[in-house]
Image (tube, grey):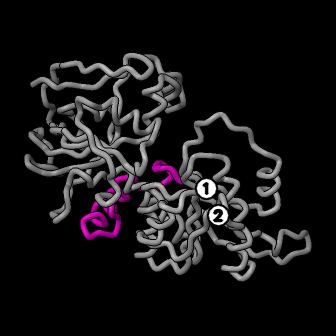
């Protein structure tokens, strides 16, 4: 059997190459790709900048992209065939998960891969993309471990909108959304935010102070990918000591959950550095690998999708075909009006 794979051959250049698949091993699973999510962490590969390579010692590290490179890691598909020793999956199963080189018509992965069988559902399985939803589950676990009762979210993109819905379902009392676009703040209210602030034209620091009785927020999730967003998070998270005073009572440290990829060329301001010193938050890089079990996070996530708690299907604003994959990357580099999440359909 042959497969057609998308390969980045240069900056903003994609070619489609037909290849013969190897024979199926006893622990292998053959998957027909139904959809792949467009993720901003793939954009630097498309632009031939940096990606997650592997060092000579076997550990993963950031490396310069050297074309040709295969791409994609948010697959949804249908199992076509399984090896003789595979017990987790059977032909016909709908699956999703996290494996690389996902922009391909067929893919063989080992049965130990981060792959989840999707439950029966009334929702479109093609939008049940486990990888980003597993990130949401992972962050939710951390917020609950912190014991946070008030949570801020900087940026109202599709990830934080899913987070708001999950936080609301988990019983978080105060969910505060920050963004610079009123249209996204309206969406935030729809998806679970109890309060919103336009940080471009409102005094969001004073607003947060008044909202929390001067305590600020237990936890802030930063997802806008800019140091300006981190600054907003630092100015709204609680002080470890009352009002940041040396003789203030110790209140426990606030948490800033960093889930962005800071890929822009930005300089840390003195104001941001001072806020980190004065508030002394714990900065938690809650990317997928910070979870104790990435597979279990994905399992929980697809179950939450099936029951509508993580409504990714409502947040997919743009779809394109595999043959028009470059169009999807252009959306991420220059988002059209109303863009939240793009998915490539096969």
Residue displayed at 23% across by 33% down: 322
Left or right of 15? Residue 254 is right
Expressed as whole percent of the image width and height from the top left, the position of residue 9 reads: 37, 16
Q: Are marks 2 and 1 in contact (CB under 8 Å)?
A: yes
Numbered range of the magenta stretch: 286-311
* Rendered position, 250 above or below 263: below
> Residue at horizontal 54%, vertical 73%?
175
User: According to the image, label 2 marks what residue?
Assistant: 255
Residue 73 in the image: state x and y as whole percent. 35, 39
Answer yes or no: is residue 36 visible. Answer: yes
Q: Position of residue 336 (x, y in %)?
A: 42, 43
Query: The N terminus lies in which quarter of the figure?
Result: top left
Residue at x-position 73% and y-position 38%: 267
Q: Nearer the viewer, residue 345 or 102?
A: 345
Q: Position of residue 165 (x, y in %)?
A: 41, 69
Residue 284, numbered label: 1
Q: Quadrant of residue 146?
A: bottom right
Label 2 to label 1, Cα distance in Å?
7 Å
- The residue at 75%/79% (across/down) is 214
Describe the element under mark 1 as helix, strand or loop.
strand
- Residue density around tag 2, few if under 14, some if 14–19, many if 20 or more, within 10 Å: many
Residue 242 belongs to the span the image colors magenta? no
Residue 293 belongs to the span the image colors magenta: yes
Q: Is residue 93 above or below residue 152?
A: above
Disc 1: CA contacts within 10 A as few (<14), some (14-19) or many (>=20): some
């Amino acid at each position: 059997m042959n497969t057609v794979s998308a390969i980045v051959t240069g900056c903003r250049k994609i070619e489609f190459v037909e290849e013969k698949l190897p024979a199926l091993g006893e622990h292998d699973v053959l998957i027909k790709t139904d959809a792949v999510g467009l993720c901003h962490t793939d954009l630097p590969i498309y632009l031939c900048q940096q990606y997650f390579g592997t060092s000579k010692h076997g550990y993963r590290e950031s490396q310069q992209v050297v074309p040709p490179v295969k791409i994609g890691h948010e697959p949804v598909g249908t199992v076509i065939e399984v090896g003789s020793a595979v017990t987790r999956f059977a032909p016909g199963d709908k699956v999703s998960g996290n494996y690389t080189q996902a922009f391909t018509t067929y893919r063989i992965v080992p049965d130990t891969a981060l792959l989840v069988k999707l439950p029966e559902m009334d929702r479109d399985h093609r939008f049940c993309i486990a990888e980003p939803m597993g990130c949401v589950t992972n962050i939710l676990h951390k917020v609950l471990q912190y014991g946070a009762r008030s949570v801020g979210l900087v940026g109202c993109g599709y990830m934080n909108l899913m987070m708001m819905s999950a936080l609301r379902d988990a019983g978080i009392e105060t969910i505060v959304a920050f963004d610079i676009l009123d249209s996204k703040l309206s969406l935030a209210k729809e998806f679970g935010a109890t309060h919103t602030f336009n940080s471009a034209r409102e005094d969001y620091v004073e607003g947060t102070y008044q909202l929390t009785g001067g305590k600020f927020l237990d936890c802030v999730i930063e997802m806008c990918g800019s140091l300006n967003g981190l600054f907003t998070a630092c100015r709204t998270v609680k002080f470890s000591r009352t009002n940041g005073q040396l003789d203030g009572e110790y209140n426990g440290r606030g948490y800033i959950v960093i889930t962005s990829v800071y890929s822009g060329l930005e300089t840390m301001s003195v104001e941001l550095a001072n806020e980190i010193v004065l508030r002394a938050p714990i900065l938690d890089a809650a990317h997928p690998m910070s979870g104790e079990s990435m597979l279990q996070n994905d399992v929980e996530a697809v179950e939450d999708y099936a029951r509508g708690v993580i409504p990714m299907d409502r947040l997919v604003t743009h779809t394109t075909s595999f043959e028009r994959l470059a169009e999807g990357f252009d959306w991420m580099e220059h988002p059209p009006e109303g863009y939240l999440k793009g998915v490539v359909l096969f």
